[in-house]
Image: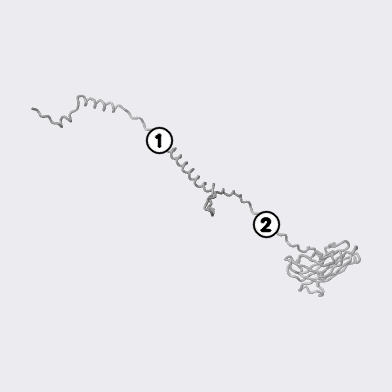
């Protein structure tokens, strides 16, 4: 009785298996694999990555802008109130401050320059003092500032009056010795204060001439104020 080896039976191949394997191997050597489209694959990958970044950025912007769309406030009763965002107000430049109006200062005249204070009344200044003419005294009058009759180191004001036709009065005088820069003069009258004008020579000589036309008789006091509103000099 013959005994066969079981392992030999398992290793045995069917008839023709070897020839089939050889034929398949020969056919595989004859096949040429197609070229892989690497460039197209790379372009496709970049396109997908850009779309993902755009999607992420859009979602991030939506998250950032969402709090601006609505603001939720918690009321005292525990309920929520939704309010719309405040309207954007464009900033406009602040209006510039209106320029400060400077206080008036005396009119500067040259020595001997004639100034008509009223019809028939002419004033002029020299280094020696005040000169003026009137219809009744066309030859002129003079008030010195250097003869020692006034102390120019101390504030003071003089007063002269001249009657005019129609009952009006020309009041004038010399002011001197005050601190700062003279600005305005006021003289009292029965109809209330009357404001006059100031004349000075160049170089701030420390004195000047004032004049005013009043509808009625003038009265004291006569007050000259500086550019700061302080009393420069007064009479009496």
> Where does label 2 land, which residue?
97
Residue 41's disc number: 1
Name the residue rendered at 79%, 74% in the picture: 151
Q: Quadrant of residue 187?
A: bottom right
Name the residue rendered at 73%, 70% in the picture: 179
Depth check, front residue: 63 or 209: 63
Q: Quadrant of the C terminus?
A: bottom right
Would you call the spot at circle 1 few (<14 residues within 10 Å), some (14-19), or many (20 or more)? few
| 83 sits to left or right of 28 | right
Closer to the chain start, of discs 1 and 2, is 1
Name the residue rendered at 79%, 67% in the picture: 208
Distance from label 1 to label 2 (Cα)? 69 Å
Q: Quadrant of residue 221?
A: bottom right
Q: Secondary structure at mark 1?
A: helix
Residue 45 sits above or below residue 150 on the image: above
Figure coloring: one colour
Residue placed farthest to the front in the image?
Answer: 77
Residue 79 sits above or below residue 177 on the image: above
Q: Position of residue 156 (x, y in %)?
A: 79, 72
| 189 sits to left or right of 43 | right
Q: Quadrant of residue 1?
A: top left
């Amino acid at each position: 009785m013959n005994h066969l080896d079981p392992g030999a039976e398992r290793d045995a191949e069917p008839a023709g298996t070897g020839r089939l394997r050889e034929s398949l191997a020969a056919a595989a050597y004859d096949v040429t694999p197609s070229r892989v489209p690497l460039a197209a694959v790379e372009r496709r990958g970049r396109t997908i990555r850009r779309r993902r970044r755009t999607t992420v950025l859009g979602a991030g912007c939506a998250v950032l802008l969402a709090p601006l769309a609505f603001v939720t406030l918690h009321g005292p009763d525990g309920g929520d109130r939704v309010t719309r965002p405040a309207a954007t107000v464009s900033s406009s430049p602040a209006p510039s401050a209106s320029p400060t109006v400077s206080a008036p200062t005396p009119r500067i005249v040259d020595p001997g320059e004639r100034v008509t204070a009223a019809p028939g009344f002419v004033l002029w200044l020299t280094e020696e003092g005040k000169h003026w003419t009137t219809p009744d005294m066309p030859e002129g009058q003079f008030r010195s500032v250097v003869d020692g009759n006034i102390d120019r180191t101390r504030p003071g004001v003089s007063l002269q009056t001249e009657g005019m036709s129609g009952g009006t009065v020309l009041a004038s005088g010399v002011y001197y010795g005050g601190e700062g820069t003279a600005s305005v003069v006021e003289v009292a009258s029965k109809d209330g204060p009357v404001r006059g004008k100031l004349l000075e020579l160049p170089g701030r000589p420390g004195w000047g001439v004032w004049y005013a036309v009043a509808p009625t008789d003038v009265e004291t006091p006569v007050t000259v104020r500086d550019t700061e509103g302080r009393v420069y000099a007064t009479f009496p």
